[in-house]
Amino acid sequence: MRKTSFGCLLALLLFCLAGCRPPAAPTITTSALPTDTPTSSPLLIATPTEMVQPTLIATPTATPEFEEGLVLDVIDGDTIDVGIKGQLYRVRYLGVNTPERKMPSYLIAKDLNRTLVSGKVVRLERDVQDKDAYGRLLRHVFVGETHVNVELLRSGWARLLVIPPNERYYEIMVEAQREAADAKRGLWAQPPTPTP
């Protein structure tokens, strides 16, 4: 009886130890990061008065509708680097466009984005297309319940940019841009009048 109890106890201990082994440390690589070269394909820049009817089609990959990751770097006002399951991905925000390098307000938009996401765990929600022509993930970005794409529009430091078929949250984004424009925030502010 003692041998049987000892054998069962040993088997139970080995079973528990096998499941308690810590996972291997993730490896983050940067070998396949795309560049931020602007696209030459036609873009639809939507204004608050335009209405776009979303097209419902299946996502091109069999992965979940969203993933979570840690923001490791803020590239500009609408692009971040995110670590997901040990891999580094460049993420381009859907539905927004912020000033590019060497443009007025570039640093303001980038700093606002940094304030919203840097070092935080984000939920990345896909729309219809998974990636752009440069291999960047196309996503709506959330920190908790805050939709970062919408916050950039509401602040006035981003403008609505819809590239069909990625049109999820279109109406919410139009309203956020309208709010910023009406309040003359950010890019919507009147330029200062030069003094004579």
Image (tube, rainbow, N blue to C red):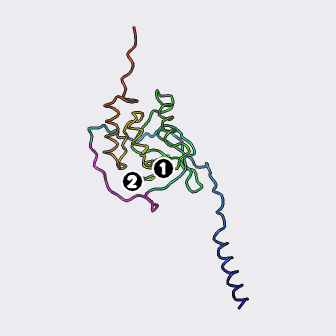
The answer to whether the residue labelled 2 contacts the one labelled 1, judged by CB atoms less than 8 Å apart, is no
Magenta segment, which residues?
51-65
Task: Name the residue at 45% across, 40% down.
Answer: 39
Task: Name the residue at 67% across, 84% down.
Answer: 8
Indicate whether residue 8 is drawn in magenta. no
**What is the number of the mark on residue 17?**
none
Tally of marks: 2
Indicate whether residue 53 is drawn in magenta. yes
Residue 23: percent from left, percent from top? 64, 63
Q: Main secondary structure of the magenta part?
A: loop
Which residue ends up furthest to the bottom in the rendered image?
1
Task: Name the residue at 48% across, 41% down.
Answer: 116
Which residue is label 2 attached to?
A: 128
Task: Assign the N terminus to one quadrant of the image.
Answer: bottom right
Residue 69: percent from left, percent from top? 53, 52
Which quadrant of the structure image shows residue 192? top left
Q: Residues within 10 Å of mark 2 (few under 14, many from 20)?
A: many
Q: Element under label 2?
A: loop
Residue 102: percent from left, percent from top? 51, 28
Which residue is label 1 attached to?
A: 137
